[in-house]
Amino acid sequence: MSQEFKPKLGINLGFCINRFPQPGVWAKIVGKELSLRWVQFVADLLNPFLPHSIIENEIKRIQESVVKYGLVIETTFTSAFTRVNHLRP
């Protein structure tokens, strides 16, 4: 029995890192302006070295924006920042 290949057209959020870091902005661009549903999150959009309360708030904002614009995040790209900063100073 062969499986049917069902490709998903999506986008990597790397284009957002320096210009559109706010979840509501990149989610609107991807979901409304580009009419895409699938996104690959880029770890640079969520700094792990921020205080826990700020990280939790940002996660909530990301989740709300993803729901609002009908997006699905299934994968994450670690990106340049998170690949070279493994240890906290």
Image: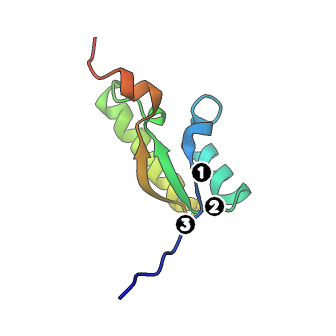
| Amino acid type, label 2 | Leu
In this view of the protein, which residue sits in the foreground, 9 or 60?
9
Distance of label 2 from label 3 (alpha carbons): 9 Å
Q: Which residue is mark 1?
A: 27
Q: Which structural element holds mark 1?
A: helix
Image spot of residue 28 (x, y percent)? 65, 52
Q: Which residue is mark 3?
A: 8
Q: Earlier in the sequence, mark 2 or mark 3?
A: 3
Question: How much space separates mark 1 and mark 2, taking CA atoms?
Answer: 10 Å
Q: Secondary structure at mark 3?
A: loop
Dot 1, how many residues are within 10 Å of its Cα: few (below 14), some (14-19), or many (20+)? many
Please name which of the two marks, 1 or 2, marks the residue nearer to the observer.
2
Q: Residue at x 53, y 54 (%)?
A: 39
Crowd band around label 2 with a 10 angstrom C-alpha radius: few (<14), some (14–19), many (20+): some
Identify the element where label 2 is drawn: loop
The front one of 50 and 8 is: 8
User: Which-is-in-front pick, marks 3 and 1?
Assistant: 3
First reached walking from the N terminus: tag 3 or tag 1: 3
Question: In this view of the protein, which residue sits in the foreground, 49 or 15?
Answer: 15
Q: Residue furthest top?
A: 89
Quadrant of the rendered structure where residue 83 is?
A: top left
Q: Determine which residue is flagged by label 2.
A: 36
Residue type beneath disc 1: Ala
Q: Position of residue 74 (x, y in %)?
A: 42, 57
Q: Are marks 2 and 3 in contact (CB under 8 Å)?
A: no
Q: Quadrant of residue 36?
A: bottom right
Is residue 83 left or right of 42 when viewed as pictured? Answer: left
